[in-house]
Amino acid sequence: MTGPGRYHLLLASAGQPIQHGWWGREDIARDKFRRWVGEYGGIPAARSDWALGGA
């Protein structure tokens, strides 16, 4: 579910998505971001992005 006030997190490696999700609360999205960095940070070319969903 996407939309205003939702936080999107995408984790990719070498241009391929590994994980992604949407959260309605910023604190939960930030916690998930920290967890993913810890769990997947050693993957070559790993990249994570997160953004606030738009209208």
Image (cartoon, helix red, strand yellow):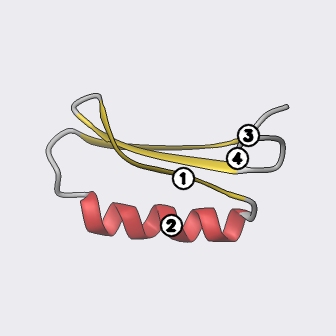
Q: What residue is disc 4 on?
A: 1
Measured in 3D between alpha carbons, the distance from the residue under mark 1 to the one under mark 4, in whole angstroms, is 9 Å
Q: Residues within 10 Å of mark 4 (few under 14, many from 20)?
A: few
Q: Is residue 46 left or right of residue 6?
A: left
Say which of marks 4 and 3 sits in front: 4
Say which of marks 1 and 4 sits in front: 4
Instruction: Find numbered disc 4 in the image and state the secondary structure of the residue it sits on.
Output: loop
Q: Which mark is residue 21?
A: 1
The mark that comes first in sequence, 3 or 1, is 1
Q: Residues within 10 Å of mark 1 (few under 14, many from 20)?
A: some
Verify CB contact (< 8 Å) between mark 1 and mark 2: yes
Instruction: Find numbered disc 1 in the image and state the secondary structure of the residue it sits on.
Output: strand
Verify CB contact (< 8 Å) between mark 4 and mark 3: no
Residue in view at x 64 percent, y 70 percent: 28
Residue in view at x 38 percent, y 63 percent: 36
Q: Which mark is residue 53?
A: 3
Q: Which mark is residue 32?
A: 2
Q: Which residue type carries mark 3?
A: Gly
Vertical order, 55 against 4 (above or below): above
How many callouts does the rendering have?
A: 4
The mark that comes first in sequence, 2 or 3, is 2
